Image: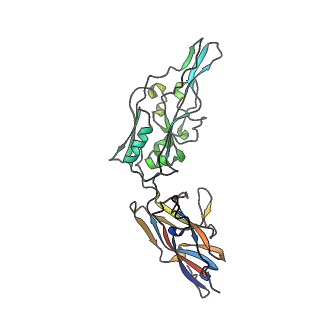
Amino acid sequence: MADLKDAGTQASYLSISSRADPAFQNATFNSASFDVVIPNSTKLNNVSRICLSSVTIPRMFPNIDESNNRLVWWKREVIEIPTAVPDYWLRTVSPMWTAVNQLTLPVGIFNIQQLLPLINAACPADEVWSYDSTARTLIIDTTPVGGPVAFGTFLDPGHVTPAVSYANMTYVTSGGGALFDTLGLQKLADRGSTRSDPFAFNQSSPNTFDATTGSNLETVSVLALFDRFAHQYSTWSANVLYRLTDFNMVNLSGPTVIHVIITDLGDNATIDAGTGVAYDVLTTVNIDSVDFGREFTRLVHDGEFEGVGFTAPRNVSRFKVQLKDRNFRQLSLPRNFPVHMVVQLVYNNR
């Protein structure tokens, strides 16, 4: 690549710290998103390119955050509906699934021994989550309580609406699906999705009560806490242990691929293939080799290959630095774990 610093250009270096943001003193300040405000200088005029010289990032990103901290449990409510024959009723289940329980984990850095008590505290008594330390995977045990519900048509001249109850089938979903990835559950959740669902719901056939097609879970990745592929209601409601073990390894590494982005300066040359949104990515780093609590430092020896160019030269007085994960979601860092950068500004001195 040709050197941009010809006879008509020069370069200066700008040292940046998240501590320099005027909002740094706020208790809620996020060191992974900060403003850079620079007093006027002739060395910041007619800038044509900003290049990375070094960046230091502390690995203190939460491995549980708003993108992967929710689990929701779903069941089908047992309902009794009138038939065309007077005094005869049909005991069946609702076509829609009901959220009967949910868990929102706190944001922070957790290991599996800290997460399991939080999950089990939200589970019903017939469901226990544990951890296989050898395989490094989760185990989920469920044992249905009570006997099977007698579904079908029945005579009841003085019918009274029964108390709310649910059939012995439970699906679990994850907010955005990300917690399934974190806990290693995604493989079985994908297998249980409607892409492999050969049955449609029939209110008169209990063996179809596991179907998600046509329901509010149709497009959702679901984890079945029962043997849905048996397609037998008597199997689902039997008072015997059902164990799920075929999971991927738990992954509590947190974000490891970090995009360092500047805003308000460049021409948005990096496009996210998933969303089509454009960003000005100064560099992308992988911090998985750094232990939690320690700093990752990237030194760029040829800054021309790590930078953002401008369509037309501009004067630089302020911009924002943001750290985002591999999916371009905003990351967060405690304010006492600052980000440090040195950038090279190539400018025209003619």
Give the residue displayed 59% in from the left and 15% down from the top: 159
Residue 144 point in image, percent of width and height: 43, 28
Give the residue displayed 53% in from the left and 39% down from the top: 196
Q: Is residue 128 left or right of residue 29?
A: left
* Quarter where residue 282 is shown: bottom right
Q: Residue furthest bottom?
A: 7
Residue 135 point in image, percent of width and height: 35, 47
Say which of 19 and 198 sits in front: 19
Give the residue displayed 43% in from the left and 24% down from the top: 146
Q: Residue furthest left?
A: 134
> In the image, is residue 199 above or below residue 88?
below
* Quarter where residue 243 is shown: top left
Colouring rule applied to residues: rainbow
> In the image, is residue 156 above or below residue 168?
above
Say which of 197 and 130 sits in front: 130
Q: Is residue 245 left or right of residue 276?
A: left
Q: How many marks?
A: 0
Give the residue displayed 41% in from the left and 32% down from the top: 126
Decide if residue 340 is in sight here.
Answer: yes
Residue 13 point in image, percent of width and height: 53, 79
Residue 194 point in image, percent of width and height: 55, 39
> In the image, is residue 300 above or below residue 155?
below
